[in-house]
Amino acid sequence: LKNTGCIIKIKQAAASELSAAQKSAAGEAVIYDISITDINEEGGGFSGGEISIRVPYTLKQSETAEGITARYISPQGASETLDTSYDKNTGIVEFTTSHLSLYAVSFDLQKAVTSWDNPFADVKENDWFYANVAFAVQKELFSGVSEDDFAPGTAMSRSMLVTVLYRLAGRPGVSGKAPFDDIPDGQWYSDAVAWGAANGIVSGVGGRKFAPDANVTREQAAAILLNYAKYANIDYPK
């Protein structure tokens, strides 16, 4: 702390440093031990004031920035959720606290869903798939069929599925065209199909055709997902 003679120390805590109650409260979260030295008060406080803490956090593939949450973990294992922001460009979590101790940083699906600004008139909060759509849209895996409609009951096309997987892979760079006569340049799925074909994830339907608008069948989806698992080195039963 500038001009105070105080030093704040932040370190990532090992599970062995936590009590059983703290481990239970923390779950799979990343734990930070935040302490302050050279201060008059004992117990890690600072005269009723507040301090902004910024710590790194790597977003997992199954998480969205909107759901990242910091929690204070007490010595007794009680958990207090804090107002938290996460910058996915810098990978920095920021929260404000009035005392220093153990803090857990993790993904909270409910927070992610609650914070979603739903643009779709055909996706309601009481729909069983609401949280799934929120996650897929926040991760930029799916988009709507228009600005206002998601079309949840519409079947998925072959081009839709390979595009979702392309986005899931991080939109890798693409060189060359897709080897199919019905995949022109400049379509929203052109790069995805080219990437999928080049990496053995998708193939055509014969006659140099991909059939981008055809519905993807269950067996096609299963084969494509297995091919993606091999590409991404995802462990699967053999």
Image (spheres, helix red, strand yellow):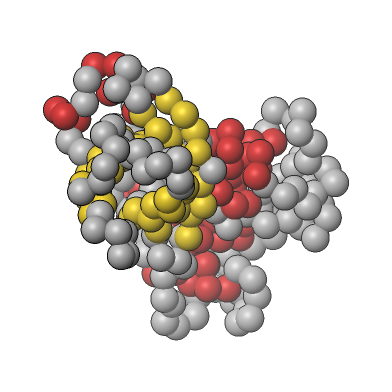
Residue 93 placement, left or right of 182: left
Q: Nearer the viewer, residue 80 or 111?
A: 80
> Which residue of the protein is positioned furthest toward the front in this rendering?
40
Residue 96 placement, left or right of 29: right
Residue 65: percent from left, percent from top: 51, 52
Residue 26 placement, left or right of 6: right
The answer to which quarter of the image holds residue 214 is bottom right
Residue 111: percent from left, percent from top: 58, 38
Residue 88: percent from left, percent from top: 46, 60
> Which residue of the protein is positioned furthest toward the left in this rendering?
16
- Position of residue 71 relative to residue 119, above or below, is above
Taking the spot 54% from the left edge, 36% from the top edge, the residue there is: 109
Is residue 99 in view? yes
Residue 129: percent from left, percent from top: 68, 33
Tally of marks: 0
The answer to which quarter of the image holds residue 199 is bottom left
User: Image quadrant for the C terminus?
Assistant: top left
Q: Nearer the viewer, residue 135 or 96?
A: 96
Is residue 106 in view? no
Q: Nearer the viewer, residue 46 or 98?
A: 46
Taking the spot 75% from the left edge, 48% from the top edge, the residue there is: 118
- Position of residue 237 relative to residue 188, above or below, is above
User: Image quadrant for the N terminus?
Assistant: bottom left
Taking the spot 57% from the left edge, 73% from the top edge, the residue there is: 190
Residue 11 placement, left or right of 197: left
Q: Nearer the viewer, residue 127 or 73?
A: 73
Taking the spot 43% from the left edge, 25% from the top edge, the residue there is: 79
